[in-house]
Image (cartoon, grey):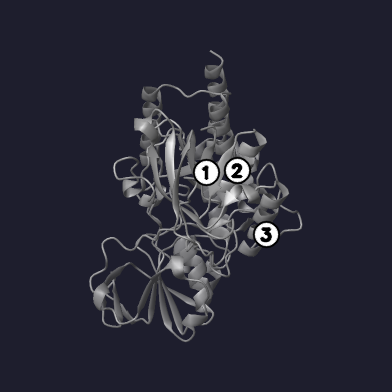
Amino acid sequence: MDKVCIIGAGSSGITSCQVLQARGIPYDCYEAGSDIGGNWRYLNDNGMSSAYKSLHINTCRDVMEYAAYPMPKTYPDFPSHFQIIEYFDDYVDDFGLRETITFRTEVTNVEPADGGDAGWDVTVRSRDTGDERTTRYRAVLVANGHHWSPRDPEPPFPGADTFTGEQLHSHYYKTPEPYADKRVLVLGIGNSACDIAVDTCRVAERTFLAMRRGAYVLPKFQFGQPFDKLVKTPLGRLPFKVQQMFTRVTLRVVQGKMTEYGLPEPDHKPLEAHPTVSADLLNRLGHGDIAVKPNIERLDGGKVHFADGSAEQIDSIIYCTGYQIRLPFFQPGLVSAEDNRVELYRRVVDPAHPGLYFVGLVQPLGAIMPIAETQSQWIADLLDGTAALPSEPEMRRSIADYERKQARRYIASKRHTIQVDFRAYLTELARERRAGARRGHR
């Protein structure tokens, strides 16, 4: 029972593989699809990829790359998903990780062995043969992602069951061609909503963008540089209020007020919600290619009625309403993700279940990849005895403190339950690794 189990070979799972391999910690990694890359592999046959054909990253190359494997400098500042998956493929092959991953194998059950004191029993099923087997592991690293189980509007809009047009979640959107000459309604003001509205407006008869609240739309470049390179500068270390003020002033200088583009006034300050990043949306709004609408009130046949009393004939509605965290391999009551909340110490450790760790279960103001890499390094510390955890009561106090800070910082939304600031969180993990090392030497 020396081995560790890693669930998933997406961007978080493969860095866990690389870190554990480098530390000499044996592991098995299971991936439901035929290849690595998870959400970033377009048309992934595991059915979990939300990537659409035109997708480019919203965090720049230098912020997104793994420390152990820099991204090629020949890549543009904001590569396409095709380039990102090529980078992941090279990463896996150069480190010799591919042969350590069991593909087309789904994890169906994870439970504490012998009541929780003897590791973890992990049951997997082959997608090719249907055969199942159960193996005991000393620890489990959950890296199954959180952008693969669509969350539909809650509750459904009145009349949704009688709407005569098409309704789909953005998870299933791939290309704009099916929307040629149609009247399309995109619901949301997050990154996917903006991308899809821009995508469809080029071919649709008309594209509408509806939302229940406003947002600050950040340009990908500010003063000739990728906007998020700032997290790697001294500015990224400044107090939150100072960063917030800098962002507000910069946006006002670079873009002006959101209301000048027809968007509603945001009901929060900058950085109090996950940022919406788009290089094209405001231009398209200014050109009249996309029409802004308030939230949907009800659906009626082929019509959509909005909160301001207006109505439009619509052929297709694309719901960009986010995702729900799902952990389908745990029995009910073992680990809860109700309302997208998972109680984890430093967003990684389950205090109630020793040997259970989560990698990449964060929504950063920045990129997940370097965060998952650092999380994996901390987990490796705990696995090889380099570091130790605090007591369970201490961990629970820390979790409660995180929850209070989240409530003060962000607007109430299921998308903010796992939110972290890129630079601050990496600093937090670095401090925890040092503190853990001190505990381990007592």
Q: CA distance from mark 1 to mark 2?
A: 8 Å
Is residue 352 visible in this depiction of the protein?
no
Is residue 415 visible in this depiction of the protein?
yes
Using the image, determine if residue 100 lies above or below residue 265.
above
Question: Where's residue 69, x and y in %?
Answer: 70, 46
Q: Which is closer to the viewer, label 3 or label 1? A: 1
Question: Of 120 and 162, which appears nearest the observer?
Answer: 120
Label 2 is placed on what type of residue?
Answer: Cys
Question: Where's residue 103, x and y in %?
Answer: 55, 55
Which of the labelled discs sits on residue 6, or is there none? 1
Name the residue carrying label 2.
17
Q: CA distance from mark 2 to mark 3?
A: 18 Å
Q: Secondary structure at mark 1?
A: strand
Q: Residue at x 40, y 27 (%)?
A: 395
Label 3 is placed on what type of residue?
Answer: Glu
Between discs 3 and 1, the one toward the N terminus: 1
Question: Of 317 and 24, which appears nearest the observer?
Answer: 24
23 relative position to 441: left or right: right
Q: Secondary structure at mark 3?
A: helix
Q: For residue 168, what is the image quadrant?
A: bottom left
Q: Which is closer to the viewer, label 2 or label 3? A: 2
Q: Do tag 1 and tag 2 residues touch (Cβ < 8 Å)?
A: yes
Residue most extreme to the left: 158
Question: Where's residue 371, x and y in %?
Answer: 56, 42
Question: Where's residue 201, x and y in %?
Answer: 50, 78
Using the image, determine if residue 235 lies above or below residue 255.
above
Between discs 1 and 2, the one toward the N terminus: 1
Residue most extreme to the top: 442
Q: CA distance from mark 3 to mark 1?
A: 22 Å
Name the residue carrying label 3.
86
Between discs 2 and 3, the one toward the N terminus: 2
